Image (cartoon, rainbow, N blue to C red):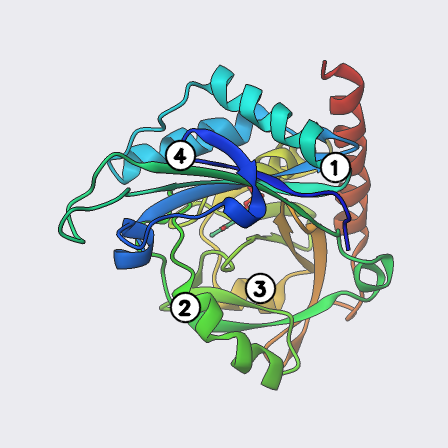
Amino acid sequence: MHSNPNYAYVRGQVVPLDQAFLHISDLAIQRGYGVFDYFRVHNGRPVFLDDYLMRLQESAKALHMEVPLSDEELKEVILDIISKNDIPVSGIKMILTGGYSANGYDPAEPSLVILQQPMALPSSELVEKGIKIITHDYVREVPRAKTINYTMGIRLIDEIRQQGAHDVLYERNGVVTEFPRCNLFIVKHDDTVITPAENVLLGVTRKNVLALADQKYKAVEGEVTVEDIYQAKEVFLTSTTKRILPIVQVNDQVIGSGKPGAVTLDLLQALIKLEEAYFSLAV
Ligand SMILES: Cc1ncc(COP(=O)(O)O)c(C=O)c1O
């Protein structure tokens, strides 16, 4: 465990974690009304921060909320928390909720919370082995917003475990979208790299991987069906906490050779290089 006291920002103040509370009238508690974003901190520096700040603004707008701090002010608070906490490899969550509602329903002045937690990327063993996933019929309510509602994903944790899987991919009428916390990519036999276009969160990792794939292969945002996945040469997921994780089985269907594919692993190396390049440029 980390020995230093951990600090968080809650409604205008940076306070020790044991004093970091929201009132029970907050709409996050009362109605699950809120959005958030999450980025990695590596050696004390935020990774691709501007992308996440922009997405927080987009999510807030989709729920008719306003982020109470400007991006510059947010950055100041973030750097303050990073320097106070000293957790070199970690993630920072910025949560914006509907605020302290007088009647438990009408939104009030939003509550902004910022907290830092240790995090670990997937082990190299997991990346070398790849994972099994299952599918489930669901579409998130406001797909372009990163809302705090993960009810379906959390309800499915037992089912995922029972099936010996690592995650669940949402699909409706055979068209797939995303995972509770990750985006999906497939690689076709002609090395075209495709990710679902509709009803997904626009992942920051998804954006970076699309750009990297476009440099070497053909990268497309379009419709992907469960059948496309079964027929794919390679399948993988992307997210801030997972980077790129190969998928070698979907339901009962083994994908390709049943091992992580060359394009997937190539893109993972390219993504790691992109992060390194970001650090060498970031001030
Ligand atoms: C619903 C959903 N889709 C996709 C992602 C992946 O996005 P990112 O690469 O920005 O982490 C997330 C991230 O948590 C998510 O919540």
Residue 51's quadrant in the figure? top right
- The percent coordinates of residue 43 (x first, y second) are 79, 32
Spatial CA distance of label 2 from label 4 is 29 Å
Residue behind mark 2: 152
Q: Secondary structure at mark 2?
A: helix
Residue for point 43% across, 65% down: 171
**Mark 3, other Cα within 10 Å: few <14 / some 14–19 / many ≥20:** many
The circle drawn on residue 11 is: 4
Three-letter code for the amino acid on which mark 1 is drawn: Leu
Circle nearer the viewer, 3 or 2: 2
Three-letter code for the amino acid on which mark 4 is drawn: Arg
Circle nearer the viewer, 2 or 4: 4
Say whether residue 206 is visible.
no
Residue behind mark 1: 271
Three-letter code for the amino acid on which mark 3 is drawn: Ile
In the picture, the quarter occupied by the C terminus is top right
Circle nearer the viewer, 2 or 1: 2
Residue for point 36% across, 28% down: 67
Circle nearer the viewer, 4 or 1: 4
Q: Earlier in the sequence, mark 3 or mark 1?
A: 3
